[in-house]
Amino acid sequence: MAMPKALVLKSLPEEAKRMIRERCELIEPHGLPLSRERLLEEIADVEGLLTNDVLIDSELLNAAKNLRVVSNQSVGYENYDLKAMTARGVIGTHTPYVLDDTVADLVFALMLAAARRVPELDAQVKQGRWGEPGCGGEAHYGIDVHHATLGIVGMGRIGEAVARRASLGFGMNVLYSGRSRKPAVERAYGAQYRTLNELLEQADFVVVLAPFTPETARMIRAEHFARMKPTAVFVNASRGQLVDEAALAEALRSRRIFAAGLDVYETEPVKAGHPLLALPNVVTLPHIGSATAKTRYDMAMTAANNLVGGLLNDRPIHIVSELQHLRKG
């Protein structure tokens, strides 16, 4: 019996490749990333695809008549056209769980760096400006993180990991908003449910961790920054599309809020000359939420396992919730 063909568009560790080769015919095209035209040629007789950013839409599905499984090496799956995949019966998987704590660590790095102005003051020291007029004393003051009030927008797995660090590690008061109450989180960390507007008005730190959906697109806009404290720190470690970046830049420029920490942007890579990059009170990272060697390895192994499990239907796989009804067996 012929092994199913699996097209891999990510650089994988040898252990992950070995897992795929044992059960599938592994196809690794040269010259990644592929142009859309070449991708549609390569995928013609493929049954499985491993990626994290290729748009899985009707055009691709029409070119890939044999495609049965798409494995994203990421938690997010905005690249999935769920309606088109449902119509074709194509399973889509992702890699939840393995990166929760790593992303939560980065959230706290952003909170601390923005609140204590770490990049701004690091630059002063390296540029030899420490001790110059206006570079010392009160000019170096930041915002305390410990015992402050944290507002989490979107209390999913990563939100829970952030709440744990906030409550148990920093003695913070935790507020959260979302589609539903989380009694277990409330019991464990003393978290309190708030509407979004209440959370914005009461929190010293606002962390956005909601998923990106049509309903959450630009959910944080000018009127929301207007509700925040002038001493508030805003952090986005979810998706850039959840925030009106022009409104955020204006809130920071006018000192309507104190600072921000960003790992994600509406367009990535963020373009040189973007208004946010010129502001001293925003920490900007290149979407590195899961970027540690161990976590990326675990994500690759999970993605490979999802791919093989989906094609052979012989092991647990992480199918995205909207496509669970396509699960075989």
Image (cartoon, helix red, strand yellow):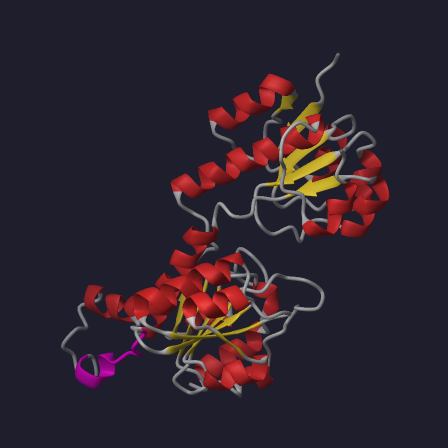
- Report the front residue among 176 and 181: 181
Assign the N terminus to one quadrant of the image. Answer: top right
196 sits left or right of 185 in the view? right
Instruction: Mark yes or no: residue 284 visible.
Output: no
x, y percentage for residue 313? 70, 29
Q: Is residue 232 left or right of residue 143?
A: right
Q: Nearer the viewer, residue 248 or 107?
A: 107
Does residue 320 appear left or right of residue 149 in this picture? right
Where in the figure is residue 257, as x and y percent of width and height?
44, 83
In this rendering, is residue 27 above or below 238? Answer: above
Q: Is residue 139 magenta?
A: yes
Q: In percent of the image, x 28 and y 78: which residue is there?
A: 142
Q: Nearer the viewer, residue 205 or 40?
A: 205
Furthest toward the top, the residue is 1
Q: Main secondary structure of the magenta part?
A: loop
**Horizontal and vertical percent position of residue 220:** 59, 76
How many badges with numbers are in the image?
A: 0
**Residue 181 in view of the camera:** yes
Q: Residue furthest left?
A: 131
In the picture, measured across the screen, residue 45 lies left or right of residue 217, that is right
* Residue drawn at the location 77% of the way across and 39% of the way down: 90
Residue drawn at x 62%, y 39% is 51
Residue 156 position within the rendered picture, expressed as x and y whole percent measured from the top left: 55, 61
Task: Look at the picture and state if 12 lies above or below 231.
Answer: above
Q: Is residue 96 above or below residue 158?
A: above
Q: In which image quadrant can residue 198 be found?
A: bottom right
From the viewer's side, name the closer residue of 124 and 84.
Answer: 84
- Give the magenta range: 136-145
The image quadrant of residue 222 is bottom right
Whether 12 is drawn above or below 191: the answer is: above
